Amino acid sequence: MARIPYVEKDGAPPEVAETFAKMEARGNYVGNLWKMIAHSSSALIHVIRTGNALLTKTRIDPKLREMAILRTAELLGCAYEIRPHTKAAIQEGMTDEQLKAIKDWESSNSFSDIERAVLCFTDEVAQVAKVKDQTFSNLAKYLDEGMMAELALIVGFYGMLARTLLPFEVDLD
C-alpha cells in the first residue's frame, strides 16, 4: 500500500483532472505512477510528455532503449518499471535469454558489443551518474552524439521515476 494516497481524477486539481481525462480519452490507463506524480500537479504533464518523447521520438534503437530501461529498473529494484518494460523489450526483440541475463549481463554471452556498451554506460549513469572515459569512447563507436544524449536521458528519466515509485511504495497496477 502506498505511503500517501493517490490523486484520483475526482477531487483532483483541474489541471490534473484534465490531464487524466485526456489520457483516458486516448485509451491510456491512468496508472498509480501518474496518480502519485499528480501530487506535483504542475510537473505531471511535463513528466508525461518527457516520457512519451523518450519512448516514441528518439532515434536510439528501441531494443537498446528497453534494455537500458530494464537495466536501470533492475539496478534500482523497481518492479513497477520491470513488468511493462519486459513486455516492451520482448516486442522490440530482446530474447528470453537476454531478459534472464540482464541482472548479470557482464558475465553473459547473450549480448552483442553494442548492447554491452549500452549496458555498461547504463550501469555507470544509473549508479554514479559519471561515466568513465573508456565507457564513453566505447559507446561512441556505436552511437552518435544525439543517440548518446538520448540514452543518458532515458536512464536518467527512468531513474527519476524509480526515485518516485520506491520511496512512496507505489503499488503495482
Image (spheres, rainbow, N blue to C red):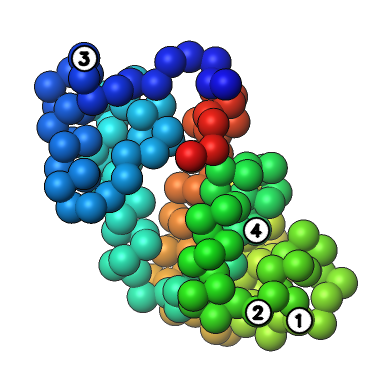
Q: Label 2 sits on what residue type?
A: Thr
Q: Quadrant of residue 104?
A: bottom right
Earlier sequence position, callout 4 versus callout 2: 4
Residue at 65 percent across and 58 percent down: it is 71
Residue 50: tell me if it is visible: no
Q: Are marks 1 and 2 in contact (CB under 8 Å)?
A: yes
Q: Position of residue 154 (x, y in %)?
A: 46, 57
Inspect the image, locate mark 3, and give the three-letter code of the amino acid beneath it: Gly
Give the CA separation, mark 3 to mark 1. 49 Å
Label 1, secondary structure: give it.
loop
Q: Earlier in the sequence, mark 2 or mark 3?
A: 3
Where is mark 4, residue-wise?
Answer: 71
Query: In the rendering, which numbered label is found on residue 11?
Result: 3
22 vs 115: above or below: above
Q: According to the image, label 1 marks what residue?
A: 110
| CA gap, disc 1 and disc 2 | 9 Å
Crowding at dot 4, Cα within 10 Å, few <14 / some 14-19 / many 20+, comes out as many
Given residues 60 and 6, the one toward you in this image is: 6
Q: CA distance from mark 2 to mark 3?
A: 44 Å
Q: Who is closer to the viewer here, 167 or 120? A: 167
Q: If you read the primary sequence from the N terminus, does the residue marked by circle 3 or circle 4 appear first?
A: 3
* Residue behind mark 2: 95
Q: Nearer the viewer, mark 4 or mark 2?
A: 2
